Image (cartoon, rainbow, N blue to C red):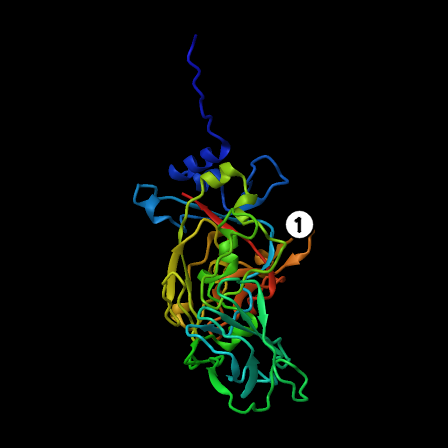
């Protein structure tokens, strides 16, 4: 009886990678070429060739593969936030039940800042708890919620005194014997402090963080896990990703053969000028500094899509990609599948804020907005 041997037949993406590695991709797949992740299935995700020899995976370069091809989603796919609003405090010591006050700095305009707020916690707050403000833009803060370190999504809502003010949770009137909990960091400094733990930046409390490396969006793009298991807190202030539209990471939506030929290029981003906090895993971040990392899926940088750089050299990440040389607004404009023009995230922060993030507007211009806002995603990948 003959021995049956299973022969793996190379698929089309294997041939694409072979073309890249042989230095033929610029001819075989010129800038602007559209390829589908499921190859001939035009209902699958369309990717456009936007650069040759721009992004590299150092482990593959070390093996002698010195050519690459960068692709980006032709249409904006997901409509998602970069980062959730964050906790204002992470406790490192026990906070006994009792009366406390916290100083909230001026944020912007009439936001209810620049004063102390008083509250009462009826139970001890354990080390490792998070304190979260309910505080929307252009509104006064209304409550503090404490989250247990062991039951993350179960709120222990603080009961507070009522004093005739418009909230039963936070009071602007002094409570006798109240203990100073600390000061939240202002929007443009790292001066926050507390004897009971770490204080966050007020803009991140209201808008979320603009550190792309630590963002919810980066985790979503580079995971295939389901049931929201793709999200893990990256900092002590992170709150769970709350959008139930995205229970499964993006990698799970792409064709397996396509994924098998993708490299993990080393790309750069930068930190803002005002406030950063280290990751739970010990990754450190300095202000106004570039940093690099490797991801399968990544966002493009403003300079890569043809925008001019900042006067701050540390913020000028990347070089213009082939497709975006001499680009115009229309070149950068992307659309959702329904034909609506889409704004889409970049991976670089607006440097003059601890929260605002650069993005491409739905008319192809450059601007910035709050990370907890929704915007489109144009995922980029690299074959090497």
Residue at (42%, 68%) from the top-left corner?
271
Between 141 and 286, the one lying in front of the other is 141
Residue at (45%, 21%) from the top-left corner?
6
Between 155 and 242, the one lying in front of the other is 155
Q: In which quarter of the image is residue 119?
A: bottom right
Quadrant where the image shows the N terminus: top left
Under tag 1, what secondary structure? loop
Quadrant where the image shows the C terminus: top left
Residue at (45%, 34%) from the top-left corner?
14
x and y percentages locating residue 303 in the rendered image: 47, 62
Q: Give the total number of marks visible in the rendering.
A: 1
Q: Is residue 381 left or right of residue 67?
A: right
Instruction: Check the image and report above or below for 196 versus 173.
Output: above
x and y percentages locating residue 83 in the rendered image: 53, 64
Q: Is residue 258 visible?
A: yes
x and y percentages locating residue 182 in the rendered image: 46, 83
Between 260 and 252, the one lying in front of the other is 252
Q: Callout 1: 10 Å neighbours few (<14), some, many (20+)? A: few
Instruction: Check the image and report above or below for 240 versus 296.
Output: below
Q: Name the residue under label 1.
A: 337
Q: In which quarter of the image is residue 243?
A: bottom right
Instruction: Check the image and report above or below for 288 versus 322.
Output: below
Between 168 and 2, the one lying in front of the other is 168
Q: Is residue 248 left or right of residue 264?
A: right
Q: Is residue 174 left or right of residue 67?
A: right
């Amino acid at each position: 009886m003959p021995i049956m041997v299973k022969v793996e037949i190379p698929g089309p993406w294997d041939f694409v990678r072979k073309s890249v590695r042989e230095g033929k991709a610029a001819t075989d797949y010129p800038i602007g070429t559209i390829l589908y992740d499921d190859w001939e299935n035009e209902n699958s995700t369309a990717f456009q060739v936007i650069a040759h020899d721009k992004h590299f995976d150092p482990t593959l370069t070390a093996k002698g593969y010195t050519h690459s091809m960068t692709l980006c989603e032709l249409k904006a796919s997901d409509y998602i936030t970069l980062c959730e609003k964050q906790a204002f405090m992470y406790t490192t010591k026990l906070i006994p039940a009792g009366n406390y006050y916290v100083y909230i700095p001026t944020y912007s305009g009439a936001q209810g800042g620049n004063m102390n707020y008083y509250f009462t916690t009826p139970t001890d707050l354990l080390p490792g708890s998070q304190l979260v403000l309910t505080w929307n833009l252009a509104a006064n803060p209304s409550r503090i919620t404490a989250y247990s370190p062991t039951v993350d999504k179960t709120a222990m809502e603080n009961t507070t005194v009522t004093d005739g003010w418009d909230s039963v949770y936070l009071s602007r009137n002094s409570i006798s014997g109240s203990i100073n909990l600390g000061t939240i960091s202002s929007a443009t400094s790292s001066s926050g402090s507390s004897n009971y733990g770490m204080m966050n930046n007020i803009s991140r409390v209201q808008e979320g963080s603009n550190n792309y490396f630590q963002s919810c969006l980066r985790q979503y793009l580079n995971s295939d896990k389901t049931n929201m298991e793709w999200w893990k807190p990256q900092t002590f202030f992170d709150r769970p990703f709350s959008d139930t539209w995205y229970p499964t990471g993006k990698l799970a939506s792409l064709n397996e053969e396509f994924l098998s030929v993708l490299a993990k290029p080393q790309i750069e981003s930068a930190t803002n000028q005002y406030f950063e906090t280290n990751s739970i895993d010990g990754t450190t971040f300095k202000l106004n500094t570039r940093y690099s990392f490797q991801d399968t899926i990544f966002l493009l940088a403003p300079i890569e899509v043809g925008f001019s750089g900042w006067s701050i050299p540390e913020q000028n990440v990347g070089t213009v990609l082939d497709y975006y040389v001499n680009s115009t607004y229309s070149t950068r404009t992307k659309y959702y599948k329904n034909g609506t023009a889409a704004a889409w995230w970049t991976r670089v922060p607006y440097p003059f804020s601890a929260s605002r993030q650069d993005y491409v507007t739905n008319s192809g211009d450059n601007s910035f907005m709050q990370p907890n806002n929704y915007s489109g995603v144009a995922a980029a990948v690299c074959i090497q």
